[in-house]
Amino acid sequence: MEQCPVGRVAHLVGDKWVLLIIRDLITGRKRFGELQKSLGSISPRTLSARLSVLEEVGLVEREAYPEIPPRVEYSLTEKGRALLPLITLMRDYGEKWLQPQYSETAEPS
């Protein structure tokens, strides 16, 4: 495991799509379909895999409701919400220093 705190955070949130999933969950609970629609070109398989990892590391909570059809919602845990200042700084940096290169549903590289 990385000894540097910056390296540990980068390892935690550095996978493709992870920061955008966290960004979308900052505003509150979302269903799988809402996340997929917001993220645009993410495949269901990739979204499911990223959500599983985020749940495993304690950033995201998954709540399944006993309904028909089944309903599952995702939300940030306290640990996940603690990333809000990082997301805000990244947004502010992007607005000030980077020109838009993507459509409305930005795909990470």
Image: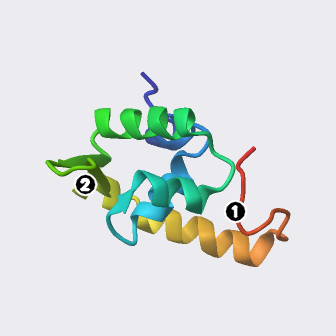
| Left-right relation of 14 to 63 | right
Q: Which residue is mark 1?
A: 105
| Left-right relation of 42 to 29 | right
User: Are the residues flagged by discs 1 and 2 in contact, CB closer than 8 Å?
Assistant: no
Q: Which residue is mark 2?
A: 77
Whether residue 4 is visible here, answered yes or no, is: no
Mark 1 vs 2, N-terminal side: 2
Residue 47 placement (x, y as % from top left): 51, 41
Question: Who is closer to the viewer here, 29 or 78?
Answer: 29
Q: Residue at x 45, y 56 (%)?
A: 22
Which dot, 1 or 2, sits closer to the camera? 1
Residue 68 placement (x, y as % from top left): 22, 50
- Quarter of the rendering occupied by the N terminus: top left
- Coloring scheme used: rainbow
Q: Secondary structure at mark 1?
A: loop
Q: Secondary structure at mark 2?
A: loop
> Against 104, is 5 above or below?
above
- Quarter of the rendering occupied by the C terminus: top right
**What whole-number distance in Å separates the C-alpha atoms at marks 1 and 2?**
24 Å
Q: Amino acid at mark 2?
A: Thr
